[in-house]
Every structure is written in structure tokens, then in C-alpha cells.
Amino acid sequence: MGTKISSFKPTDVQAALAKTQRGRRITPVRSRGLVRYRMIPSVPVPVSLLERQRLVGAPGREPLWDRFCTLRSQVLAVMERRGWRSLGITSARPGEGKTWTAVNLAISISRRVGHTALLVDANLRRPAVHRYFDIAKRHGLANYLCDGAPLESLMLHPVVGNLSVVPAGESVADSSDFLASGQMHTLVRDITGRYANRTVLFDMPSVADGDGALAMFPHVDAVLLVVEEGSTNRETLRRAAEALGDTPIIGTVLNKGEDDDA
Ligand SMILES: Nc1ncnc2c1ncn2[C@@H]1O[C@H](COP(=O)(O)OP(=O)(O)O)[C@@H](O)[C@H]1O
Ligand SMILES: [Mg+2]
């Protein structure tokens, strides 16, 4: 399996539809963040974890880093131009690489000078962000939505860039009611409004996996659509894009390309 991210085209689902069988590469730049959080618990991210999870920053994965830097720059350029603060990462079906893309993009954004990123695992039915950082599944967004736990008590700081993470917590089967709730609305308003230099990313459910994605769409300014190259059926992708309704698609990422070396 390859790790290619390609053909990122802002607002262009047609490009993904046309390239479900084939992909193209993207390239460029590297930078580091400066600010460090002190208030929230730190989670060490050893190189071995970056390697195991195929994350940006792992030694020998410079091409991956380059591609995510390009993706980051493209995403941030559109978000800054439009005044958008929150981005949902979704896909038509489970397993296409949403969480992997969300984690790598969040790390890349958090390493931009003067920028911070907050990654929220909003896939309450199939939580996964915690696995990428080796975090225990016990506490997270579900505790805030279901039990009223304060968000600050659920936030973690993986020691990589200026990144904060809110894991999902224990799995919630019927999660869409919680995701559609006023509490979720309040949370999104709070976390997107707090710091001007912070981008909030939501790892979302896939469109085909219950109605969690539909519940999340109203909360995000735009979505990034992850498409498993050569696998996602065109009709499935078209239906997923339709299900987004008025939610803008900032772009698409063709994932798991065959001829990749990252
Ligand atoms: N580009 C890639 N190269 C290699 N493995 C990948 C890639 N993208 C995702 N994966 C792996 O595929 C599996 C599913 O990815 P994940 O991000 O969890 O999917 P989703 O969140 O869409 O359900 C995970 O094991 C992940 O590590
Ligand atoms: Mg996932």
C-alpha cells in the first residue's frame, strides 16, 4: 500500500471523480512552530511512534512531509481567504484514510510558524485519533457531550508542533444526537473563536457510516474529502459529495496511491 497524497484541488470534486483510478503528486516546503502549551498534559510522541503510524516527521519520510506541507499551505490559504476556522475531514466510506490524513494535516499545520492546530476526534462511533498517539481511549469528546465534563480536562498536547488533541473517548453507538446537539454547537463556537491563529480540525465519521457525518456538517466551515485512490466507487463518491449539501468542500485528497515512496 502506498502513501501518496495527490491531486489536492480546492473545491474540485470532479478532479477526484476523474482520478479514482489514477493519481498525481504534489510537492514543497518545511517550517517549524514556536509556541508551546504549558497548561495541558503533554503526551510524548517518540520517533518510533511516528514511524509506526507513518506520520509526518518520521525519519526517511521527507516526501510525505513535503506533500503534507503543500496540502497544509493550500488548505490554510483557502481558509484564511474565506475566514474559515474549522475543517472536517471526511470520506465516502470508512477506511479511506480520514484519520491518518487528519492527524498528518494537523501536525503539519501545527508546525507552521505562529500557527496552532486543535484536532478533535468527532468520530464517536469509531474513535481512532487516540491510536495514532498511543493515548488511552478513556476520556474525550464523549465525556464532554454525554457527561458535561469540562473540555479543558479532556485536552492533550502531543509533543509535536503546537498541536492539541481532544480524543473521542469511549465509543458511542448512537452518536449523531450528541454531535447534532447544542452542546456541540457551543463547543465548536468556543474552540474556533478562542485563538486567531488556531485551526480546528475534526476527524469525522464517513458519510456512509450512519448519520454522524450529517450531524457534523453544520458545525464545520468546510470539509476535506479523502478518497481512496483506485478503490472508491464513483457513484459512492458522488453521493457523498451530494450528502454534504451546502457545506463547502475545500478540496479532495487522493490517498493510498500505488506508486508512492513515502
Ligand atoms: N496513505 C496511506 N498509506 C498507508 N496506510 C494508510 C494510508 N492512509 C491510511 N492508511 C492506513 O489505513 C487504515 C485506515 O486509515 P484510517 O485513517 O483509520 O481510515 P478512516 O479514518 O477513513 O476510517 C489505517 O490502518 C491507516 O494507518
Ligand atoms: Mg477514522
Image: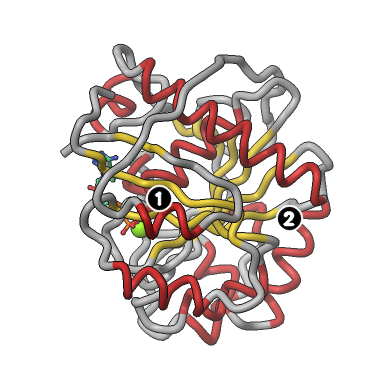
Cα distance in 3D space between marks 2 and 1: 18 Å
Q: Quadrant of the N terminus?
A: top left
Please tell me whether residue 149 is drawn above or below residue 95 in the rendered image: below
Look at the numbered disc 1 and say if its residue's Cβ is closer than 8 Å to ligand 2. yes
- The location of residue 253, given as percent across then percent down, is 43, 47
Q: Is mark 2 within 8 Å of ligand 2?
A: no
- Please indicate, yes or no, whether residue 137 appears anywhere in the rendered image: no
Q: Which residue is pictured at 48% across the width and 30% down the height?
A: 68
Numbered label attached to residue 176: none
Picture layout, residue 91 above or below residue 186:
above
Horizontal side, residue 137 vs residue 69: left or right? left
The answer to whether 104 is drawn above or below residue 93 in the figure is: above
* Tally of marks: 2
Q: Which residue is drawn at 63% across and 31% down?
A: 73
* Cβ atoms under marks 2 and 1 closer than 8 Å: no
In the image, what residue type sits under mark 1? Val
Between 124 and 142, the one nearer to me in the picture: 124
Disc 2 crowd, CA 10 A, few/some/many (<14, 14-19, 20+) = some
Question: What kind of element bears circle 1?
Answer: helix
Q: Where is residue 23 in the image (x, y as percent from the top left)?
A: 32, 41
Which secondary structure, mark 2? helix
